[in-house]
Image (cartoon, rainbow, N blue to C red):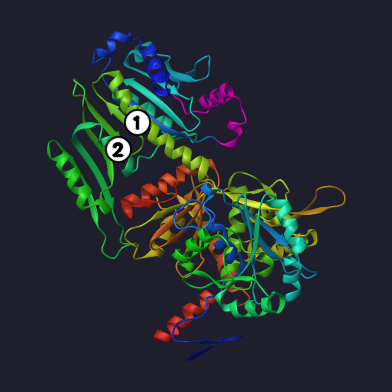
Amino acid sequence: MDFINELTERVRQQIGLELTSDENFSFFQPAGNEHMVQFFYKNLSEEYWDLDMWNRHHLFLCDLPTKPDYEFVLDDDGRFATLEHSDSKQSKEVAAVMDLRDDYIVVVYYFGDSKICARINQLLKASPNLHACYLGMSIFEQVVCELEQITHLEFDFEQQSAMFSEPVNLKGTISGQPAQLIYHQYLQNHKPFFNIQSISGRISDESHGKVIFQFDGMAQVDDCRLSDFMQIVKLLFLLLRLKYKSLADKCILKWSGTEEKNYISLDGNMIEFNLNKPIEKLEGLIRYLVKGDKQLLLYGSSERISRKLWSVKSINVNSKSQIELEVSDAMVRVYLKNRTSIPLLDSIEDFIRKHIAADIENSSF
Amino acid sequence: MKTVHFDHLTIDSTESMLKYSCTNSRLVNWVLRQVNDQPGLIFPKRKGWSSRLKLLYPGDQNLVYFNVLVSNTTELLVFIPINDKSKASHLKCISNPQQISELKKQSCETAKSVQVFYIACEKNGAYASELLQSLFQNFNLMVLDYEKMSFVRGNFKNPRLEFRLSVQELDTDLIPDLLPENQQVISDGITNSLFYQNVLFHINQYWLTGSSAVHLRTALKNSIPYWKQYRKKDQQVIIRQIKEDLNKVFIECYDSEFSFKDSSANSSISETMIVFPEVPSGRKELNNWSRKQELALGYFRDEGKQISIEGLNFAMDSDLTGT
């Protein structure tokens, strides 16, 4: 059984669904038809990885920020956790299954009242051990292929005068019929400035349910077959797992001693974002990377390496994770020193796509 | 021809072009950068290439040589950076057949072909060539200029490598700073401040994650990857020098809120520790610390023993354009 099939089975079990009721598009009546999936990167520090799976997941759940009226409880086998409410009324309104099996991605499946789901999800996002996965443009382009028609589009691009003498802004929200046309036109004609935040559309099953994808790793659907939605979840899971596994396995830069101990060797790739249009005022970008800009919250120092390259070494004020960068007017190079720096990489990519160039190329993996 | 005078040196230039000059670490960084899977690099990891680095002391002096071994199962390539401080006796010692055969034994016993490459920056190219000619009949010398690394003598035996090198597009200014500068040979403000930026970054890591103090040796071990390869006596000298330098900035830039204390790890060894203040609680406080660190790095930049070639180039460009 593949990974997502097992999750589907656990979801069915939690809802109490029979196999046949999969054909019922509104399978979670009467509490509501919303189904939401949030993908998180498993941002665990070294101490967690020293533990066996059950203890690791148990400790992870203990460390989640919770409210007194509910908690995630680990299954006996330590692979999934489910939401339990102290108030039985609420358990009819919302339920959730957290899939903890993968080493890189945590999938949380919510169903029920979308407002309550969103509230619980917001709380999970505040956990330092969970980082909402970042959907870049290439992932959006792939999931859009699963939609019969795009019905809603949100995009947000705003260059800063600190970095560009003539900043370009391209932000907006488009709903209804024109969304499909605008998506394709902008992708073709304005790609350097077209930074999608959210995209919605009808999925191609008989329910014509509406699915929403958000840049911070969230997919939501109001009405469809569980199995159809799970196909979309599977695609997103595979894309995100590939991305975060590649980052964790190949892009952590580490010096290590060889067997003879007389030699050291360097493992891992740096990550390079190549900017198709150079930044006009490089000092402006460097200020954002070291002076605690609200979006990045990075504090650090910058030093010039050569005529074109600057070294930036910064720390995130919230997570205390550290990150090293090298920047030139046409490139941002990121050095990850451990797995817990990966969320900072996402913040930097998001910042670049939102404020510098939406069509950056990453040639690293 | 235009001549530019600085306090301690005179440089002749033809129009705006100066010969490219860089430290040995930068040459090593060029080699290390080539061992990866991104397009356009010479030693793709997917083809089995890997690299190793070693420090060599070919004499009684403190002059340290980086030695980079790049190998796959059948080939071993040894890269040795040389500069104007290099001496014939050093190169003779590093390159003697016994030493090379030892390297082969230690790192790539299956190698059927072993080649040694000396690498130098453009400014030191002529000196390196003369030095090597006085020692060897045949040698491979590669020189890094602003736009390329190229052979001035010899070549890769492997034609694939030769081809990849010949088509490589390179902007020397964008070579990544993978290997921190060797503190023993720091000679200008830029490398000095880069070195201390790295050291302070690692010290901050201990401080901001809640430690109340850290051994200076531990912080250095983490910030200099080849720390363990320094001779013990050199480690002591480096620690003393760095302690002295940091002490100045702790007093002048950090208002003595960071300080040193000597602790006895056991009865015979006294270890220097850096004692930290409270972890900053918010953005405002971090901002203050950030400013202090900026001051400290400015101090290291200005305290550099001489102006760097990059500094010279900027000065030269300005001079020539009359700005």
Q: Is residue A46 above or below residue B205?
A: above
**Residue B23 image offset from top left, x and y in percent:** 60, 70
Residue matched to label 1: A235
Left or right: B218, with B163 as reference point: right
Q: Is residue B275 visible?
A: no
Q: Is residue A53 magenta?
A: yes
Q: Is residue A248 magenta?
A: no
Q: Choose between A334 and B23: the one closer to the eye.
A: B23
Q: Is residue B290 above or below residue B122?
A: above
Q: Name the amino acid type tagged 2.
A: Gln
In three-dimensional space, the C-alpha distance between marks 1 and 2, rounded to whole angstroms, equals 9 Å
**Chief secondary structure of the magenta span?**
helix
**Residue B77 image offset from top left, x and y in percent:** 63, 59
Crowd tier of the residue under label 2, counting other residues whose Cα lies within 10 Å: few below 14, some 14–19, many 20 or above: few
Left or right: A114, with A69 as reference point: left
Crowd tier of the residue under label 1, counting other residues whose Cα lies within 10 Å: few below 14, some 14–19, many 20 or above: some
Residue matched to label 2: A142
Tell me the residue at 29%/8% (across/down). Answer: A20
Q: Quadrant of residue A48?
A: top right
- Disc 1: which chain? A
Farthest left residue in view: A177
**Residue A331 image offset from top left, x and y in percent:** 41, 59
Quarter holding the N terminus of chain A is top left
**Residue B57 image offset from top left, x and y in percent:** 75, 65
Q: Quadrant of residue B86?
A: bottom right
Left or right: B150, with B129 as reference point: left
- Disc 2: which chain? A
* Part of the protein shown in magenta: A45-67
